Amino acid sequence: MRHGGDRKACVQSKEHCAGARQGGHGSGRRADQREEKKRRTPLSGRHPAAFRNALGPDGQPLFLPMSRTEMEQLGWDSLDVLFVSGDGYIDHPSFGVALLGRWLVRHGFRVGIVAQPDWRDPASVTGLGRPRLFAGVTAGALDSLLAHYTAFRKKRHDDAYTPGGRAGARPNRASIVYANLIRQAFPGLSVVLGGIEASLRRISHYDFWTDALRRSLLLDAKADVLVYGMGEHAVLELARRAAAGLPLTHVPGTAWMGRPEDVPAEAACLPLPAHEDILADKTLLMRATLDMEMQVHQGTAYAVQPVGGRAVILAPPAPPLRTEEMDALYGMPFARRAHPSYDAPIPADAMMRTSITSHRGCGGGCSFCSLALHQGRRISSRSEESILHEVAALAARGPVAISDVGGPTANMWQGRCASSRPCRRRSCCFPRLCPNFITPQRRHVALLRRLRDMPGIRQVRVASGVRCDLAVNDVEAMRAYTLEFTGGQLKVAPEHCSPRVLRLMRKPELPVFEEFLQFFLRQSRNAGREQYVVPYLMSAFPGCDEDDMRMLADWLRQRHWAPQQVQCFIPTPGTVATAMYYAGVDERGDPVHVARTDAERLRLHAMLMPAMGRKGGRDDGMDHLRDVPPPRRSARKESGAARTGRRPAGKQGGGNG
């Protein structure tokens, strides 16, 4: 079902924001044989007898059941809703199946989970029985193809969302495969698609892995309904309608197959280019993408896309959650660990265990980012009391270091728009900050300080990173982020230095980042602290050519700088940047250069990564730059700004800015 909470996965177009997805090297025939053997080996030995599930006083189970035995322990003879997921089950609010499953239980429904079933065997989804209402299907926290393949279409050899971290536990195009599996196992049962894979493929979309335009996932999966965006409102309403025997259509935040006349006559409706028209004229994908972006942001209109004599009907998006709803959602009794039946750890479990979600949504609207179409630009924030309560519960288990208190960008907590008029902007931050976009960063700093001073809290960090264009507008907050909540490194995302490429990305101009950088270095030096900015950069972006990459390489060389991550652009479905890649035009319809072949993309990437393609070099398009040897300088100088500004090779980091 809709992945409701994983803020790191939602920015999947910017691959380094999605967490630990490190690819390996080409492996040849023997490695392929090993991979196939692993795929045919059961995920992990499960020992349900060693764990006894039970209901708490609030009616919530210790874990959502994954077996008939657990259902019996809970006193459940059947389920209302069955979730089928491409991820292993971690009972943490950063993972959508756990979040939405508990949300439904809170409202009186019985929910079970089948995690990473054997997609070759329908019996693998029947163990908990036929659900009464519907089956919710999700590929997991990532698009399954992005989870499997690198920027250069090489197979990845690990998966952070699978026990043991191994690859191959989910199929390609998992939403389609799991939907077919459900129909075979439970004929006539309603199938509801959700999650990031379905959300970004809700209308015609470019598929990088086949280099083709594909129609809505609804058609290929033959599902009844698709939930797009953050799914708490939609999933609950679908369950209530199914229980009452009502149609599963016209629910805000959902899409279904119908006809244009299905849209209420009095409703605002946005006509999208037909799938067949986009096939004939690639530039129409840009128009469709921009129209969808505005439909989500304004939040009032239906959208209709004709395809094959029918139409994809999209209800208006679900409204963002209010603060009290966010508090209720994240206040549920999550176990904050993987299901006890697994005998191998799930890497993402450790990554997220001490991470606190303070808000969702992002006003940035970067053209390569999926957030504009998925979480939206309006910020939904939790209250300070809710966050304090969650951290206190963590500390009650023993002393703990909080790895992150944030969202897509940490310093947008409690961000809001001061205007009540309809907004036509594509971004709250580009080409310059909107004066109506209010971000109370000092209040965020005050929250972090309260958390840090709580008993049992060793430290508090902001691993999700900050937006430098917001931070430079509040010196006091920027000083606090730099000196109090940076664990030796602060993550920001300038992405590039070329003015032309930055405009196409909808990113701030380079002087904004350089102002932030100089402040960070100066404050760190004055405090006698060795700290690093961890910048994320992108190669082979649409509109970026060799001159732009040379400019970036020269800019790095002049600063003797070794940024942590260099990501080769991956055209993931639904984003404006992917429409640029497919159509070869920018948002205004003007032609842009596009590096289409892997050879050209590799050549542009190698301008920053000379070792690319050599023995021992990475092949996933996500690399660490080596240190550029600096000029000799005195020990006093070396201990100051140069050490603060230069990043030692080999240190790890992830996040977004």
Image (cartoon, helix red, strand yellow):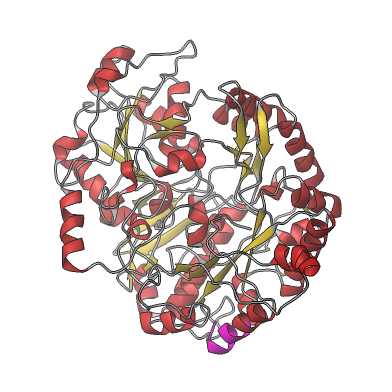
Frontmost residue, 108 versus 275: 108
Rendered location of residue 566, percent (x, y): 52, 69
Q: Place residue 35 in its image quadrant.
A: bottom left
* Residue 434 can be seen, yes or no: no
Task: Give the overall secondary structure of the magenta segment.
Answer: helix
Quarter holding the N terminus is top left
Q: Place residue 72 in its image quadrant.
A: top left
**Residue at the spot 44% in from the left edge and 68% down from the top edge:** 570
Using the image, determine if residue 281 lies above or below residue 319.
Answer: below
Rendered location of residue 191, percent (x, y): 29, 41
- Number of labelled discs? 0
The residue stretch that appears in magenta = 544-551
Give the left or right position of residue 313, taking residue 137 as reference: right
Using the image, determine if residue 599 lies above or below residue 331.
Answer: below
**Residue at the spot 74% in from the left edge and 53% down from the top edge:** 421
Rendered location of residue 633, percent (x, y): 75, 75
Rendered location of residue 52, percent (x, y): 32, 15
Frontmost residue, 262 versus 154: 154
**Residue at the spot 42% in from the left edge and 56% down from the top edge:** 21
Q: Place residue 104 in its image quadrant.
A: top left
162 in the magenta segment: no
Give the left or right position of residue 562, taking residue 90 as reference: right
* Residue 308 can be seen, yes or no: yes
Give the left or right position of residue 267, taking residue 62 as reference: right
Using the image, determine if residue 108 lies above or below residue 406.
Answer: above
Frontmost residue, 535 versus 400: 400
**Residue at the spot 27% in from the left edge and 56% down from the top edge:** 172
Quarter holding the C terminus is bottom right
